[in-house]
Amino acid sequence: MSDFFTVALLTAILRSATPLVLAAMGGILSERSGVINIALEGMMLTGAFFAVAGTHWTGSPWLGAAIGVGAASVAAMIHAFWCITLRGNQIVAGTAINLIAAGLTAFLIQLIWDRAGATDSVEQLPDLFGTVNVLVFAALVIVPLVHFYLFRTKQGLHTMASGESPQAAESVGIDVTRNRYLAVVASGALAGMGGAYLSIGNLSYFTLDMTAGRGFIALAAVIFGGWTPFGAAGAALLFGAAQAIQIEAQATSGFPISADLLVALPYLLTLIAVTGLIRKSNGPAGLGQHANAH
Amino acid sequence: MAGITRLNARMNRRRVIAASGGTVLGAAIFGNLSVGSAQESDVTVTMVTDTAGVGDQNFNDLAVLGGDRAAEELGVTFNILESQTQADYSPNLAQGGETSDLTIAVGALLGDAVAEVAPQFPDKFFALLDGVVEQDNVYSVVFREHEGAYLGGVLSALVSQSGILGVVGGIRVPPVARYEVGFVAGARTINPDIEVLISYADSFEDPALGQELTLAQLNNGADVVLPIAGRTGVGSFDAVNEQGEGFWIMAGDTDQSHLAPGRQLAAIRKGVDVAFFDAAQAVVDGNFPGGTVDDLGLVEGGMDIYAFDATVDQSMLDTVAAYKQAIIDGVIVPPADDDALAAFVPTPLDGAATPAASPAATPAS
């Protein structure tokens, strides 16, 4: 067992956790401002696709990543418009974003590459220190930044106030609408970066539905981490570790624990976290509530 | 009640759109393929994919190849309905039954849905590739993947320096399991001490996971990996590309050397495109073999091994050819499931090439 936990396994954990960490930071911003964001999956998928398309168009993976992040922000803007301005149901809006992202990316692959299901290969974002992609380090830097923003800046505290009690926040002059728009669009940007990591950080192309539920797992990490940046990042690392360990277990003959069980473990942990058996999971009190009608 | 019915109708419609994703729109692009056909036919053929969908670089894309050929050579109208989730199988098949003469379900996972939907359209034809449904209007085609995979295992064991191979599977449906056990049996025939690492993604559509599964196998000493995992398997090519020299892909279903130039040892060929075309032709010719099952292996040309890398030398090619002939002659019967593999006694042919990895070179575990 001593040679089981190797550098290779540790970097595999980081690789598996990075898209979850980035999307989870987005989830925290959106939900802390009071907007439920089950659209993380669709925003990641949008970011993953446009990162490849952008690299294809510009020839630069950096510009590609920026275009991916921008496109996911546009998807988030639609979510924000529906949830905040139109005061629509936030779950329905999120589901719609996810379905639109799946359909639109499938269609655009055919439009741009004239084939179905997968794009051509494009240039990847560079790796640092061997096999660790630059976006892995970006994720590690973003976590404390989100923490600092939420808990140490006026803007961040206003965002959280908008999520705890939109009516009370408005009554003291906080612009809930503006704060929520900012938070939701930022969540799209971060989820888009997570998607870009998958498509041009880890791999070098986009395939249909390649996010494979990671947006939902990121949302589970938000809940598991009690809506705090460090908590959610820890949860994402735990989920990444569970995946990396089951992968290593399958590739190691005679590993004592069933790989199927290890695959199920992160989801089981989330379920336990949600039921509050480990500790109480309290979301922002104003989650899903609209501000006062004007 | 009326409100509920209307809601259901709306939800169904959305599901069909969701099921087909961009494909309803994309169908227009595919539809164009039938323009300019050599021959006109009023037969419509609809393909329903499994969740891996078009663009998986192997199984589904092979079926599309057969459909394109049918459109071109027979003049049939060829449509594709993609399934995003397993819940889309039945609605997509029913849509195929309503709109076309022949609906071809591509993939073992669609078997139950075919059994459910085909009786609702008794005057229409259905075909199931990779599974068996015994009904009068259903033609089933299964492949003896283990025969092709056995040859893949033989060649991989000959080439492997480490004496460790890998298999990366999508979901362990019967055709995937046949690939796996056939590959293991072939490898053991050449090198009884060979180790085969076997990993499953439980998904046919997660290339990032496929890459990680493959990297872990390579890190644990595997130097030839067989992915049988749809789009998940595309990630295996990335992993092998990353490791470079000395690491190989044994491709499943079809030649995918464009995904890893110079790193694909060979490809195990599965005649999905031929089976698809033949089914379409039978409908055009009016002799659709409804109610029958075709079981295709090496002897029928349904399976083969091809697209060898230039580094595969003549003695290896001769050895592979000898084992192929032995299977065709019935001298060797590759195992098709776990029980058969457990009972399988490897019987090396005389005068065959010897493995690169001697048993002594195998690292102690």
Image: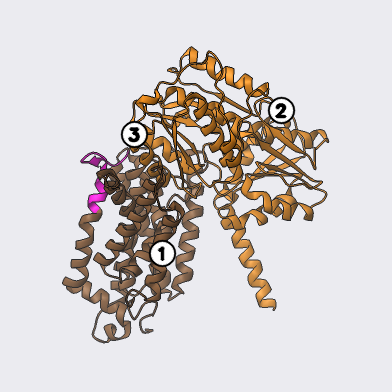
Chain colours: A brown, B orange
Q: Nearer the viewer, residue B313 or B51?
A: B313
Work out which quarter of the rendered image holds the C terminus of chain B and state it: top left
Instruction: Find numbered disc 1 in the image and state the secondary structure of the residue it sits on.
Output: helix
Q: Is residue B273 left or right of residue A241?
A: right
| Type of amino acid under label 3 | Ala
Mark 2 or 3 closer to N-term? 2
Q: Nearer the viewer, residue A78 or B170?
A: B170
Q: Please give the label number shown on residue A121.
A: none
As measured in the structure, the alpha-carbon distance from the residue carrying label 2 to the one carrying label 3 is: 61 Å
Residue A164 location (% of width, % of height): 30, 80
Q: Nearer the viewer, mark 1 or mark 3?
A: 3
Magenta segment range? A124-138
Answer above or below: position of A32 versus B315. Answer: below
Query: Which residue carries the number 1 mark?
Result: A78
| Type of amino acid under label 1 | Ile
Q: Nearer the viewer, residue A249 or A226?
A: A249
Q: Please give the label number shown on residue B38.
A: 2
Instruction: Find numbered disc 2 in the image and state the secondary structure of the residue it sits on.
Output: loop
Whether labels 1 and 3 belong to a single chain: the reply is: no
Residue A146 location (% of width, % of height): 23, 64
| Type of amino acid under label 2 | Ala
**Residue A170 in view in this figure:** yes
Q: Please give the label number shown on residue B364.
A: 3
Q: Residue at x 69, y 26 (%)?
A: B300
